[in-house]
Structure formats: C-alpha cells, structure tokens
Image: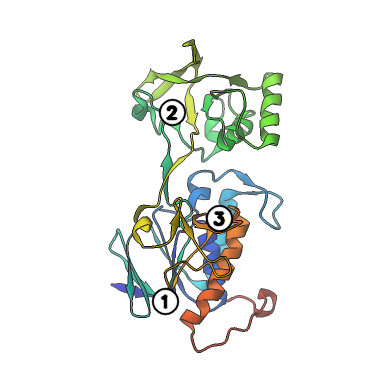
Amino acid sequence: MTHKTDVIIIGAGPVGLFAIFECGMLRMRAHVIDSLDTAGGQCAALYPEKPIYDIPGYPRVEAADLIGRLVEQAKPFNPVYHLGEQVDALTAIDGGWRVTTSAGTVVEAKAVIVAAGVGAFGPNRPPLVGLETYEGKSVFYLVKRREEMRGKRVVIAGGGDSAVDWALALADVAARVMVIHRRPKFRAAPESAARLDALAKSGAIDLVVPYQLHSLEGANGQLSAVTVANLDGKVRRLEAEVLLAFFGLAMNLGPIANWGLNLERNHIRIEPATCATNAAGIFAIGDIATYAGKLKLILCGFSEAAMAAHAIHPLVHPSEVLHFEYSTTKGVPG
C-alpha cells in the first residue's frame, strides 16, 4: 500500500511535531516517520522529567509535558504516525518524493521535512568488563523517572550537563549520590556547577575527583559496588546499587548520509530563509539543520518549522496565493 500525502516529516521530536501544526495551518496534510516507538525524540527517550526553561510562555515545563502539548496541538490536523520505523530509501518521483521505511511502508508527498534531530543516537558506553550484564538493570544511560532512584546509592559518571543536572535532581531522592569525574572542573552550565559544588561542600553529595571508572562488582545484573581509579593508580571502592553513565551520545545519520544532501559535520546545510536543502522539495529543520549563526534551541526549531511550511505551500498548492494570517484570526479546526 502506498500512502499519498502533502508533506512527509522525518522525525517526531518537538520540532517535527510542531511542523505538523504549521503545515496543518496551511492546509497541508502530514505523515510522520520516526525510528523510535513513541513521539518525542530525545525529550521522550532520554529525559522526559527534565525541566526546560526557555520555551516561550512556560517558565518551566518538563520535557514529557511539552511533548504531550505538542501532540495535542497537532491533533486537529489528523497526522498519520509511522513510529518504530526507519526511513530506508528516499526516491525522487514525478512531482515529489517517495519514502520507504524499514517496515515496508511507502509514502509519497510533494515535499519532505527532515527533523531528525541528531539522527539515530545511542549512548557512549564506558569500556568496563562485564558492563552488558548490568545494562538496563543497574547501569543506565538515562533516567526516565526520578522516583526509580529513591533510596538508592547512586554513582554518576561524567562531567557534562547531564551528569551535573541529574546529580542535582537526585540529591534529595537517592540515599547517596556520588559523582565521578576525571578532573575537578565540570563542563556544565556555570550555575549548575556552582550548585553542585555547594552541595558537595555541605556534604549532601560526594564529588569523587579526579577519578575514572575502573570496574564493576555485583551479581545477576545487580551492582554492589563501583571501583574507580585515578591517574596514579589509586583505587577506591564505592558501594552502590546504580551507575548512571553520562558520556554523551554516539550520533549516526544512518541512511540520511546517502541522500545526496549537503552535509557539514553530520548536519544538513540549509538556506536559512526557507530551510531548503540543495535537493528541491527537501527541507531540514531543528538540530540536524545548520547555517551561519544557527542556535540549537527548540524555540529556533519551532521558527524553522514555520518557515519551512510557508516555503512548501507553493509546492503543494501551486495555483494559490498564500495570504498570511495570524492564528488568532484564522483559528484551528474544531
């Protein structure tokens, strides 16, 4: 079966979801494809409880709540989701593009919006013997629910924003939080790093620096301790039930790399006024798109979704002149 629609959106993260709304407001139907089995991208898969502070109108909103609102906002335009499917092939056809997914789904449209974030992503795993036996049981690369850590002794390894943010978030939940980093200086936001230092000085958490992960102890997938070592070979044993390893994501564009688009350091270069790529009818928005002065912010991705939708309108409705209207004037479907 071949589905026919106006726009194919590749990626169901926050920017892809808002693109449904922007296309819908211009009377363009959308099919959405994402390799994850749920909408939301990294917000849903990596940090659903993480607070976001720079969404206009929301002084503070948790990632999962933001995704829920975006799904609700897109609902009146009846998008069709193909979740848990990866785009295997992108083929030019007369008047548009054909997308084929790993599940055999075929969708044809006049235009394609690539909102694939960082592409396919997975954690950078520390090189520890027997690590795989603990993964998903007591070694994790993300925290979906803070309450799962309540009353546990938690070791957090890493020196970036994720490590510091979760150390702060779990300080009053876990029985003990121990943060391992190979040097005293953290690569997190200065305010967060200062709060971490203050908690350590008050005794609320333990900073184990400068140390690196050395080995794991436990049985049947359950940790009993994490050993760490410094550059001089000194080893410390930390009794722990959970290890959270935050060493960043391994990003892979996957099939996108073979679509003939202008790539620049694993990003797609676009025309910033329209979000158009070098391939006619293909547009890119959000973190995967790059141009001079690009800021990787969700709110910038929202703006790019609007610009791409307006640039696509003449491809879908070539005989119509688009008269810009504000949503307060136009309204949305009931």
Dividing the image into 4 quarters, which one contains the N terminus?
A: bottom left
**Mark 3 highlights which residue?**
67
Label 1 element class: loop
Report if residue 85 is visible in the image.
no
Residue 139 image offset from top left, x and y in percent: 43, 29
Side of 323 where 23 appears, left or right: left
Type of amino acid under label 1: Lys
Label 2 element class: loop
The residue sitting at 43% across, 36% down in the picture is 124
**Mark 1 highlights which residue?**
110
Image position of 284 with respect to 184: above or below: below
Distance, label 3 to label 1, CA atoms, is 27 Å
Distance, label 3 to label 2, CA atoms, is 28 Å
Examine the image and state in which quarter residue 6 appears.
bottom left
Distance, label 2 to label 1, CA atoms, is 47 Å
Give the foreground label among 3 and 1.
1
Q: How many neighbours does mark 1 have within 10 angstroms: few (below 14), some (14-19), or many (20 or more)? A: many
Question: Could you tell me how many numbered marks the image carries?
Answer: 3
N-terminal-most mark, 3 or 2 = 3
Dividing the image into 4 quarters, which one contains the C terminus?
A: bottom right
- Give the label on residue 138, or none: 2
Residue 229 image offset from top left, x and y in percent: 48, 15
Examine the image and state in which quarter residue 125 appears.
top left
N-terminal-most mark, 3 or 1 = 3
Image position of 203 with respect to 316: above or below: above
Report if residue 67 is visible in the image.
yes
Residue 173 image offset from top left, x and y in percent: 61, 29
Q: How many neighbours does mark 3 have within 10 angstroms: few (below 14), some (14-19), or many (20 or more)? A: many
